[in-house]
Structure formats: structure tokens, C-alpha cells
Image (cartoon, helix red, strand yellow):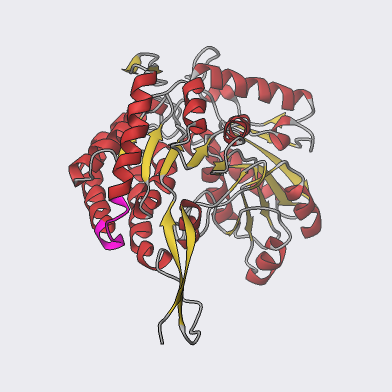
Amino acid sequence: MKTISPVDGSVYVERASATAAEIDATLQRARSAQRLWRQLSIAERAALLERFCAAFATRGAQIATELSWQMGRPIRYAPSEVRGTLERARYMIGAAANALADIDPGPKPGFRRFIRREPLGVVFTVAAWNYPYLIAVNSVVPALLAGNAVILKHSAQTPLCAERFADCFAAAGLPPGVFQVLHLEHTDTERVIRDARVDFVAFTGSVAGGRAVQRAAAERFIGVGLELGGCDPVYVRHDADLAHAIENIVDGAYFNSGQSCCGLQRLFVHESVHERFTAGCIDLIGQYRLGDPLDPATTLGPVVRTAAAESVRAQLRSAIAAGARPVIDEREFPLSRVGTPYLAPQLLLDAPANSSVMREEIFGPVAGIMKVHSDQEAIARMNDSAFGLTAAIWTGDEAAALALGEQVNTGTWFMNRCDYLDPALAWVGVKDSGRGCALSVLGFEHLSRPKSFHLRVAT
């Protein structure tokens, strides 16, 4: 398995895929180690995971540099993933005691009754490359806190991220076998999902990948958490603070070269502010510097691989053929060239509702703007999608934001911000954006099972 760096096309990492014997041994170690791990108290597990956080923070600079080489994020932004990973991990550590505490249904004469959250067993996490630590931590840390063993299969683009998790857990003193890493081909990934020693699958990836995971798990009665694609909308209302909206929305659409499931792609703008908003976006997009992600001055790195860049270019051609108007001059980004992963940002105006930019997940530095005439038109267009991960509104009216948010079919509704996972809030998707829940106290419910204790007390 070779990781081709989008920075310069070199082979940055090379790993052998796990053999059948190695897979079997890994599953058996996880099963055995989990029986002992679950016997530790929540406080003991939390203390060990705090040590993991300390080890992760110590390695932050190395982790950030490796991240830039593996998937192309500019080095000036890569440290934010380290900070975000620690924020989520530490929140879940702090929430574990209450989230996993016994539930007391109230007194009943002659009985002691309670519901206990028990671990599932072995959790298999299949993580994506675009936010490799942030995605993995959503399931890895709460699964361990709940008393499960975890096997992490990371993308072939970011294998070192899995290994750094393992390094930090080893430094923290996690018992052997409780957390393990497997480098797997697709067929072996499906084999692991089908294995009776796996009790839950947490998958992040494409809709097609999610369907493949669901098919592989269909013969077994295990839980599957699916965080899939997005084509996320935003509504800029007539009363929005335009300067703030432009800055936030451009960042939400083009950060990480647009390679974000919850990045903004469909921009619906009220007709009264459409012209000013569009002009501001064009000006701000033009200030991006596309270049070597290891250069601290670079603000827009390459997409993950040349094939991904060519796919985005094809989607752009399709949208333009359907009537969308590109307004960013690609010549202003001289490093952007066909046959490379370096891709200029683009903004499309008057994109038809059925065009690729308004219907498909592009996963590149591309967004489309459509003018709308009312709140209700904006809501109808926001809902006109197969996806439902996040949606956002820019407005000065909180009451209107709440009322409109109740009408939007989405997992998260933002007002005056976007593209952020608050670890205290549930991370969910609807429609083709997936199912299940990560983060918040609710995230523990999918990584544990309720067990009722009904005890008649001797009188």
C-alpha cells in the first residue's frame, strides 16, 4: 500500500497490507483484551485516556507535518487538527462518567432497579483521510471509554495517522490489544466487518462506501454508524452581516481545499444582498494562495490526488455546460494545472438547480451561488438535496433562524457559523449523509448497550 503525497507526487509511506493470519490474530487479541479492559472503572479508563491526550499533544508538531505530506493540508492550518482532536477527546473524557452512569428509574417497594450501559465488545473504526484525526477520534475515544476494544483501519492515504494513535496509546500505558491498527485492502475490510468478533462498525466515507459497509454487515445484527457525504447549503438572509458572512462562508467552502463532508457548497443568497455578497466572495477567493502546503504562506493546498482533481474538473465542466457561470480566473492561480492535484478555487453563479454543483458532493474548492427571493424559497432549495449533514443561515434575527431551522432536514443547523463540530452536540446525518450519532453524551449510546437489572430485595 503506497501513499502518494499530493505535495510532490512522491511515495511518502509504504505499508504491507495485513495478511489473513495477522487479521485473525488482531481480532483475537482485541476480543481477549476487551474482557479485562471492561473490568476497569470509568475513572480508570478516563485517566489513561488523559495520558493519551498528553502524549498526542507532545507529538503535535510531528503529527501536523505528517498530515500535510499525506493529504496536502497547508502547514499553517494543520496544527488546528491537533487542537481539535484534543478538544473532542477531552470533552468525551469529561462527559463519560455521567453519560455511562447507571440510570435509576425511581423507587419501587421491594425492588432495586437500574439500567447499566455495557460495552459492545470490539469496535471497528474505518476512518477517512480528509480530517484523519478528527474523524477517528469521534469513535475511538468514546468507544474505549465505554469499555470496548478498538481496531482502527485508516485510509491508505493517511496510514501514519492510525499509527500515531497507536503510539500515543502505547505511551499512555493502554493494555496491549485494547487498541490496534490494521492496514487493509477493501476486500479484507469487508471480511473484518463480517467477522463474528466485531460488534460495531464506525465508518466515515462516501455514500457508495457506506452502502458497501451496510451490505457487509447486513448478515449480522450489529450496529453500524455511517458518516457519509454532504452537499451542504447556506442561506444568506436579507439582514445578514455581510462582511462576517462573506468571511465565514468563503472559509467554510474552501478550507481544506473544499474536502470536507460539511463544507459549504450550495450558497443561496437573498436578492437584496446578492450582488454585494457575490462581489465580496470573488474578492476574498482571489486572495487565496495556491501552493506547496509546506510553505507557511500557502493558504490553499492541493487536493488529495490527481484523480480527485480531474474528477472535480469534470464536475465543473458539467455544471458550466448546464448554464453555471464561472467567475474566478484560473490564470490567477498559475500552479493550477491539468494532470496535477493543484486546483484553482472556483465560484459558479446562476448554477441551475439540477447542475452538478447543486446536486453532487464535489469535494473540491468549488461552490455555487443561487439568488432567492424569500425565506420559503431558500428553505425549499436547501431541502432539495439527497444529503442532509449540516445547513447554515446568516441573519441578525435569532427567532427567524430557529423557525427556519426547524423546517430544514439536516443533522446540524448553524446560525452565523459553519463547518464546526461542537463536541457537546450530537453529530448526525440524515438522508444520504448517513445514520447514527457521534459526539455528545448521546454518542456513547451507540457504543454501548443497555442492560437492565431487576432485583427483588429480601424482606
Relative height, residue 213 to residue 138 (above, below): above
Residue pictured at 29% horizontal, 50% vertical: 37
Locate residue 318: give its quadrant: top right
Q: Residue at x 24, y 34 (%)?
A: 62
Furthest residue in direction front, as rendered: 459
Q: Residue at x 33, y 18 (%)?
A: 15
Answer with the quarter of the image where residue 289 lies.
Answer: top left
Q: Is 40 part of what is drawn in magenta?
A: yes
- In the image, taking residue 117 as reference, residue 214 lies left or right, namely right
Residue 98, placed above or below residue 293: below
Task: Indicate whether 182 appears above or below 407.
Answer: above
Residue 96: percent from left, percent from top: 37, 62
Whether residue 166 sits left or right of residue 124 in the image: it is left
Residue span colored magenta: 37-44
Question: How many numbered marks appear?
Answer: 0
Q: Is residue 178 visible?
A: no
Residue 298 appears in view? yes
Residue 313 appears at what percent x and percent y?
A: 62, 21
- Expressed as whole percent of the image width and height from the top left, the position of residue 458 reads 40, 83
The reply to whether the magenta stretch includes residue 424 is: no
Q: In front: 380, or 218?
A: 218
* Residue at the image position 49 percent from the left and 26 percent from the top: 191
231 sits to left or right of 138: right
